[in-house]
Image (cartoon, grey):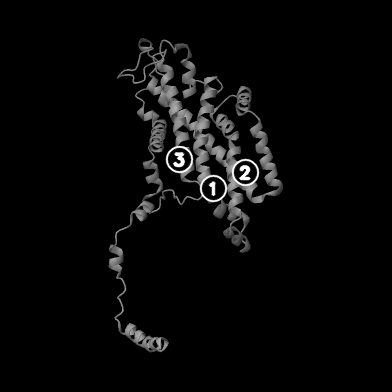
Amino acid sequence: MDSSIRVLEAPRKQEREKMRPASPPPSRRSARAEPLRPAETRVRRTGFLHRLRSDKAAFAAFLLLVLVVFGAVGAPLLSPSSADVIAPGEKLQPPSARHPFGTDDLGRDLFVRVLQGGRVSVAVGVTAVLITLLIGVAGGAVAGYCGGVVDSLVMRLADVMLSIPVFLIILLSTSIFSPGFVLLCFLIGSVQWMEVARVVRATVISTGRQEFVSAARALGIPGARILFRHVLPHSGGPILVAATLGLAQAIVIESTLSFFGFGLQPPAVSWGSLLKDAQSYLATAPWIAIFPGVMIIATVLSCYVLGDFLKSVLAPGRAMRLPSLRR
């Protein structure tokens, strides 16, 4: 009896459902007018610049590096006088309104000399980093993409270079040849490429196993184009981190060489040479050593803090994009 009643009620139910008016589809205006959820808003705001501004230490390090680079580039415009102007009547003056960083043993304005020294130190560091990236990226990319004998040769060369003390190589080279700007940059850059090569090689090997690389090879695209157009762009994050850390190392090496007298010779001024000239006045005029030392420490520390921030932001698995210049 119950089964027969259910059979009779089924068609009636279907007829009632057909007679119901269909609900209108949601309009585009209502869909656009809906406010963004908090989770969606957070996802849209987590860009590179927002992350940089939210990290106070990294943002402070970035601003300090910008000021250092601006001071190095604009040193001739910011300096009220030449770095070699001697004023015997104003020697060993403490910091004042006229001389913000004081004067040295010959009466030269230390603020002007620190600006000029930063120009030399930053120029040597940036040039050395460019040489490091050129050698390291080329070596790591070729080793990771070609593999086999080429990979073994490049990596064994990197192991040999890592086993030799870097500072000893530079000291021997600068003692044999006159340490000019080009030679100094080449020496510093040519002994730091090993870590960059290893990072690029690992990224190229992992990217080369992806399906889009296999598809490009199947389509007959040349290997050089695959390497430069499809594989190397994935190494941009690690290369940027390596460049930031390499800049700090290059500045430290250049300052150490200048401190021991193996860097650029006078009349060239660098932060290391200023520290060298201040050795005899640490007790009577400590500001001669304080300001160049603070600039070295602040610049190197800013590079390391910014490099650590870039390493966390550009880590694999994070959907983080660098700001684009295209509009």
Give the mark nearest the N terminus, 2 or 1.
2
Q: Which residue is mark 1?
A: 235
Kindly identify which numbered label has been placed on residue 309: 3
Q: Residue furthest right?
A: 149
Q: Quadrant of the C terminus?
A: bottom left
The residue carrying pointer 2 sits among few (fewer than 14), some (14 to 19) or many (20 or more) residues within 10 Å by Cα, namely many
- Residue at image position (51%, 28%) is 252
Q: Residue at x 56, y 50 (%)?
A: 232
Structural crowding at the residue carrying mark 3, measured as other residues with C-alpha within 10 Å and reported as few (<14), some (14–19) or many (≥20): some
The amino acid marked with disc number 1 is: Ser
Q: Nearer the viewer, residue 12 or 207?
A: 12
Work out whether mark 1 precedes mark 3 in sequence or the reverse, and give the earlier one: 1
Q: Amino acid at mark 2?
A: Gly
Q: Quadrant of the N terminus?
A: bottom left
Mark 1, Cα crowd under 10 Å, few <14 / some 14-19 / many 20+, is: some
The answer, for residue 83, to whether it is visible in the render is no
> Label 2 vs label 1: CA separation?
13 Å
Q: Are marks 2 and 1 in contact (CB under 8 Å)?
A: no
Name, please, the residue furthest toward the front: 1
The amino acid pointed to by label 3 is: Phe
Give the camera-side residue of 36 and 132: 36
